Image (tube, helix red, strand yellow):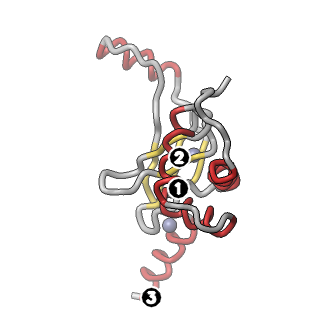
Amino acid sequence: MSSPALRLTPQRRAVLDVVAESDDHPTAGQVLDRVRERVEGVGAATVYRTLALLVESGQVAELRVGERQALRYDQNIHSHAHLVCTACGQVQDAYVQLDAGALAELTEKTSFTVAGYDVQLHGRCAPCAAQDNAKESAQ
Ligand SMILES: [Zn+2]
Ligand SMILES: [Zn+2]
């Protein structure tokens, strides 16, 4: 099962719980804030180290949404795509499947064997899109 090295102290437990209850893909800083709401006096280093351990043991997934962006943490470790709002930075889960025919064609063209894929779709979330539309019609 999971790495035997990961003994769940109350502080680590709180980190795991916070990530498990967050579906907004929080950054390490956001996880730290949420853990501190539950457990007093938790050090940032403890939270960051625990996140790294949880990623290593496969209980939490790490997600990079942009080059200069902080890493996000995902409680959903199953293969899924992400919808990234380029206006507010919100990240939503989505399930999109690449067409098997398209993958076969790609392999044929490039001789590259695909073992898996990460999909990120960039655009506007519903509230940001609505705001854009409101701005446009106000002009
Ligand atoms: Zn947005
Ligand atoms: Zn996700």
In the image, residue 41 lies at what x, y percent?
A: 59, 67
Query: Does the numbered disc 1 mark a residue whose Cβ is under 8 Å from ligand 2?
Result: yes
In the image, residue 133 lies at what x, y percent?
A: 48, 76
What whole-number distance in Å separates the C-alpha atoms at marks 1 and 2?
Answer: 19 Å
- Residue for point 52% across, 20% down: 100
Q: Nearer the viewer, mark 1 or mark 3?
A: 1
- Residue for point 58% across, 30% down: 5
Is 73 or 33 nearer to us in this picture? 33
User: Disc 2 or 3, which lies upstream in sequence?
Assistant: 2
Residue denoted by label 2: 51
User: Disc 1 or 3, which lies upstream in sequence?
Assistant: 1
Secondary structure of the residue carrying numbered label 3: helix
Residue denoted by label 1: 91
Q: Nearer the viewer, mark 2 or mark 3?
A: 2
Instruction: Name the kind of residue labelled 1 in the image.
Output: Val
Residue denoted by label 3: 138
In the image, residue 71 lies at what x, y percent?
A: 43, 51
User: Disc 1 or 2, which lies upstream in sequence?
Assistant: 2
- Residue for point 63% across, 27% down: 4
Secondary structure of the residue carrying numbered label 1: strand
Instruction: Name the kind of residue labelled 2 in the image.
Output: Leu
Q: Nearer the viewer, mark 1 or mark 2?
A: 2
Q: In which quadrant will I find the N terminus?
A: top right
